[in-house]
């Protein structure tokens, strides 16, 4: 059922007209399986690029899809919110994917995604030695991921933003818990890896975009959860990143930070571009407080072996205090105005 009980008749008619064509419905169906470029759609549909571009423009003009730039590439995705998104979802749900031409489209889409996987695998192969060396310095990632899943499952959330998404791992493991996930990363190579991983894991409720962690291409006050997983140590100004991330949270939203405790492994700075050698509880707590968040939980994942040669992984969970303040005021008989 559409969320808006009353919709302008002309808007509804125009939206239906834009979708009411075989190729355009096929495009909408394909975009329900993930973000695609013009070249991707052209390859799947077997149509000329000018023709595909015209179809995309019609859908774009009516707000049924969105376009975003990633370097020199343009990606398309379904409308991110509003009446248009729900209308498209209701239409797509009625398509029989076992019938031609949709079944053939899905086969060709699988080939397109396979090529992405090959490109992602090549990038991983080139950088595997460096990443494996860092992984060997701390506890297995599964231990941290299990703790994250347990912690996040304690309180339901609908929307998630992963800043510096990298391989898209946070979007992948938390996908059963959210309805809509967005990952942001500056690296096109890593976005290729993330898309490939999400495809392989059959995650269809998440998308990734190119963008700066200090100015993410997303709306403010829109997310129940923001994650910053093993990113802060690469930044010259991690406090600014936390401050910006806090602006993206809904009232009472949560911010999950995963990074290293303070250490003295200088080779990480020299050889792996680590700008900061870990963070203390006090430092993170102060930055969260300055951004309007209270620290709810801090967990340690200590290394095994000789401590001086290892890294302790830290997990910090902060919560936007705006609704908490409102609740306190209510208890005292004060106005329930939100704080910013």
Image: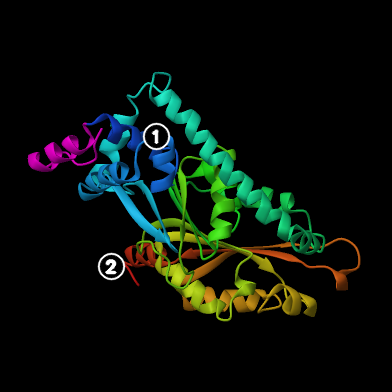
Count the numbered circles shown: 2
| Dots 2, 1 in contact, CB < 8 A | no
Local packing at callout 2 (Cα closer than 10 Å; few below 14, some 14-19, many 20+) is few
Task: Identify the disc placed on residue 46.
Answer: 1
**Residue placed at 31% from the left, 67% from the top?**
338
In the rendered image, the quadrant that contains the N terminus is top left
Q: Residue 151: in sight, yes or no?
A: no
CA distance separating discs 2 and 1:
56 Å
Local SS, label 1: loop
Residue 46 is at least partly visible in this image: yes
Give, as a single range, the part of the protein colored magenta: 1-20
**Would you identify the image quadrant in which residue 3 lies?**
top left
Q: Position of residue 53 (x, y in %)?
A: 30, 47
Q: Local crowd at mark 1 within 10 Å, few (<14), some, or many (≥20)?
A: few
108 to 271, vertically: above or below:
above
Residue 88 image point, x, y percent: 29, 37
Q: Which residue is mark 2?
A: 337
Quarter that holds the C terminus: bottom left
- Residue farthest toward the top in the current orientation of the protein: 99
Give percent across and percent down for residue 256.
Answer: 56, 61
Residue in front for this viewpoint, 240 or 63: 63
Which disc number belongs to residue 277?
Answer: none
Q: Residue at x 54, y 35 (%)?
A: 111
Query: Going by the image, does 82 lie left or right of 232?
Result: left
Residue that appears at 46% across and 49% down = 207
The relative height of residue 267 versus residue 165 in the rendered view (above or below) is: below
Regarding mark 2 in the picture, which secondary structure is present there? loop
Instruction: Residue at 53% x, 60% y: name it.
Output: 188
Q: Is residue 3 magenta?
A: yes
């Amino acid at each position: 059922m559409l969320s808006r009980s009353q919709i302008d008749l002309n808007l509804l008619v125009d939206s239906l007209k834009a979708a009411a064509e075989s190729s355009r419905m096929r495009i909408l169906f394909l975009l329900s399986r993930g973000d695609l470029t013009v070249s991707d759609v052209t390859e799947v549909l077997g149509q000329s690029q000018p023709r595909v571009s015209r179809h995309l423009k019609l859908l774009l003009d009516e707000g049924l899809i969105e376009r975003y730039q990633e370097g020199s590439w343009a990606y398309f995705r379904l409308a991110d919110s509003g009446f248009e998104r729900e209308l498209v979802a209701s239409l797509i749900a009625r398509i029989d994917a076992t019938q031609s031409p949709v079944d053939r489209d899905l086969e060709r889409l699988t080939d397109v995604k396979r090529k992405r996987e090959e490109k992602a695998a090549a990038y991983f192969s080139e950088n595997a030695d460096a990443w494996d060396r860092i992984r060997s310095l701390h506890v297995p990632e599964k231990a941290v991921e299990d703790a994250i899943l347990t912690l996040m499952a304690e309180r339901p959330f609908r929307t998630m933003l992963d800043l510096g998404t990298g391989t898209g791992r946070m979007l992948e493991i938390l996908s059963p818990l959210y309805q809509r996930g967005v990952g942001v990363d500056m690296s096109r190579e890593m976005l290729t890896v993330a898309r490939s991983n999400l495809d392989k894991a059959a995650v269809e409720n998440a998308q990734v975009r190119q963008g700066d962690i200090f100015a993410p291409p997303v709306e403010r006050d829109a997310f129940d959860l923001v994650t910053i997983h093993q990113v802060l140590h690469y930044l010259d100004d991690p406090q600014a990143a936390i401050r910006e991330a806090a602006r993206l949270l809904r009232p009472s939203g949560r911010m999950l930070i995963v990074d290293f405790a303070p250490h003295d492994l200088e080779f990480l700075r020299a050889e792996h571009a680590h700008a900061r050698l870990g963070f203390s509880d006090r430092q993170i707590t102060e930055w969260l407080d300055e951004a309007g968040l209270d620290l709810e939980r801090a967990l340690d994942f200590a290394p095994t072996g000789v401590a001086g040669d290892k890294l302790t992984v830290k997990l910090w969970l902060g919560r936007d205090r705006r609704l908490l303040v409102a609740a306190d005021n209510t208890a005292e008989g004060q106005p329930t105005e939100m704080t910013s």
